[in-house]
Image (spheres, helix red, strand yellow):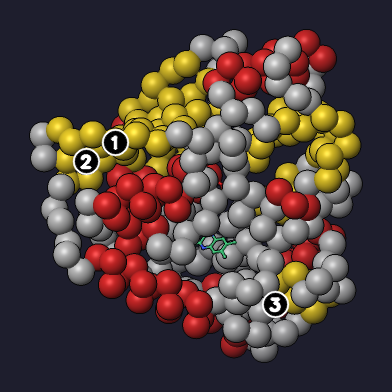
Amino acid sequence: MSLKISQNVNLAEYTSWLVGGNADNFCLPKTLDDLKEAISFAKDKNLKITILGGGTNVLVSDDGIEGLTICLRRLSKISSFEKDGRLHIEALSGTAKSELLKTFLKQKLAPALFLAGLPGDVGGGVVMNAGVAEAFVPREFMDFVDWVEVLTLDLQTIRLQKNQLNVKYRHTDGWQPHIIVNVGMSWPLENDPTILDKVRETNKIRLSKQPLDMPSCGSVFKNPEGHKAAQLIDSTGLKGYRVGDAQVSLKHANFIVNLEKATAKNIWDVITHVQKTVEKEKGVKLTTEVVKLGRW
Ligand SMILES: Cc1cc2nc3c(=O)[nH]c(=O)nc-3n(C[C@H](O)[C@H](O)[C@H](O)COP(=O)(O)OP(=O)(O)OC[C@H]3O[C@@H](n4cnc5c(N)ncnc54)[C@H](O)[C@@H]3O)c2cc1C
């Protein structure tokens, strides 16, 4: 067996919130064969599998994750070619979105602007259908995805076309219960000579509006229909609300930051307090964008 599977690995360093307990079993596959080994290991021992991409939209329990946690960030490879007036890109799911940005940027294509400052991996981008508030085109990750390849628990690879998936606001369904391993994307070769300036400007705006110097998972809550979650939270006076070292950001009300030693429980307590307060004072239910993983 060439894949290393370790026990009791602390997951905090694999999440952008820098919180969470240990994975009972943990591995970082670099190839599809490694990933197949990991799945076989879990099947032999009857372990539940949990997938971690870039860890930028998850809240891992302080009590850790049971079974086998597979972190895909080393399953990374990107290639591209031009055909029929479009740039086609194929990326393994652990490829960082920043690598994808560079590939679009080389050709001065619009998805580079959408990807500016968007963390995490390509697979996480598909699952979360990551999106931005600005009226960019494209504006959601799935806008430029053509197909995904999944690896089943029987170690079969299946290609699913986009029309076989159910694409929603901040979530894509239809690929479960498998693991997304490869993603095919494309965009018309319509070159925008000003794209690099626009990417720089977008990064500047993000830096001025978001607490990027502190650990967070980006926006915690989805925008309820007809509302902006950040505005609802701000108008209930919750900016700065704190439990332990978890705090509603003073800069952006939809971010919860880890001031230093926050626990996952601290963050969850802030989340539930925000939900209760906004529902009581504004009559609007906030649901989380962030995904809870592990023993809750
Ligand atoms: C500073 C900051 C800014 C952010 N800004 C934005 C923003 O503007 N817009 C936005 O939409 N999001 C934003 N986010 C949230 C996050 O970056 C995105 O949702 C991102 O797409 C998540 O990707 P990830 O690889 O980190 O996924 P993870 O957080 O690792 O995983 C998310 C979910 O996907 C599952 N998963 C991941 N990869 C796979 C796979 N290959 N197969 C099956 N399941 C998988 C995981 O099990 C988990 O349930 C921000 C986060 C931060 C920290």
For residue 52, side relative to residue 8 (left or right): left
Observer-nearest residue: 210 or 224? 210
Q: Is residue 143 visible?
A: no
Question: Distance between the Cα atoms at labels 1 and 3?
Answer: 41 Å
Label 3 secondary element: strand
Question: Distance between the Cα atoms at labels 2 and 1?
Answer: 7 Å
Q: Quadrant of residue 273?
A: bottom right
**Badge 1 amino acid:** Ser
The residue indicated by pointer 3 is 248
Residue at image coords 17%, 64%: 193
Q: Position of residue 163 (x, y in %)?
A: 31, 32
Observer-nearest residue: 84 or 81? 81
Q: Are marks 2 and 1 in contact (CB under 8 Å)?
A: yes
Label for residue 80? 1
Residue at image coords 72%, 84%: 240
Q: Quadrant of residue 131?
A: bottom left
Question: Between tags 1 and 3, which lies in front?
Answer: 1
Question: Distance between the Cα atoms at labels 2 and 3?
Answer: 41 Å
Q: Earlier in the sequence, mark 2 or mark 1?
A: 1
| Residue labelled 1 has its Cβ within 8 Å of some atom of ligand 1 | no
For residue 45, side relative to residue 165 (left or right): right
Q: Residues within 10 Å of mark 3 (few under 14, many from 20)?
A: many
Q: Residues within 10 Å of mark 1 (few under 14, many from 20)?
A: some
Relative to 248, residue 110 above or below: above
Relative to 193, residue 28 above or below: above
The residue indicated by pointer 2 is 87
**Badge 2 amino acid:** Leu
Label for residue 149? none
Residue at image coords 77%, 65%: 267
Q: Position of residue 292 (x, y in %)?
A: 71, 49
